[in-house]
Image: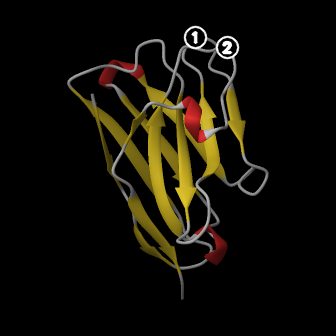
Amino acid sequence: VQLVESGGGLVQPGGSLRLSCATSGHTFSGRTVAWFRQVQGKEREFVAGVTFSSWRTEYADSVKGRFTIFRDNAVNTFYLQMNTLKPEDTAVYYCAAGPRSPVVQVRPLAYDTWGQGTQVTVSS
């Protein structure tokens, strides 16, 4: 199973970006999916996640009201819509797929499949 990310880049503060994560050779059927981010020298942190069966979502406090995670199971792709971006959102963003679960897991160790990462830079 391979996760392929796209959509990162450079954006000015207050701008928007949409990240995409697609599978290659498998599906997200039944699995929770999530986005994490990491700044060099710091631990990988949970950003947002969504379950498959209940469509339950979870967000880090720092992104609530600005970011939205959503998925299109028909095309095995999920997304992170990021609005009102701030310089502190600058990081490498990773998509991940995890287990079947009624709730969104926020620990990185709960996820067994990861994308390669895409850089998001928020700067004027």
Q: Residue furthest right?
A: 61
User: Which quarter of the image is occupied by the N terminus?
Assistant: top left
Are discs 2 and 1 less than 8 Å apart at CB?
Answer: yes
Q: Residue furthest left?
A: 25
Residue at 67% x, 37% y is 106
Q: Eyeballing the image, is 57 above or below 55? A: below
In the structure shown, which secondary structural element does the residue marked by tag 2 occupy?
loop
Q: Eyeballing the image, is 15 above or below 97? A: below
In percent of width and height, residue 3 lies at 31, 38
What kind of residue is marked 1?
Ser
List the residue tagged with mark 1: 53
What kind of residue is marked 2?
Pro
In percent of width and height, residue 43 lies at 61, 59
Report the front residue among 108 and 5. Answer: 108
Q: Residues within 10 Å of mark 2 (few under 14, many from 20)?
A: some
List the residue tagged with mark 2: 102
Report the front residue among 57 and 65. Answer: 57
Say whether residue 94 is left or right of residue 21.
Answer: right
In percent of width and height, residue 66 lies at 68, 55
Say whether residue 38 is left or right of residue 26.
Answer: right
Residue at 64% x, 47% y is 46
Residue at 33% x, 51% y is 116
In the structure shown, which secondary structural element does the residue marked by tag 1 occupy?
loop
User: Which quarter of the image is occupied by the C terminus?
Assistant: bottom right
Say whether residue 114 is left or right of residue 34.
Answer: left
Q: Residue furthest bottom?
A: 124
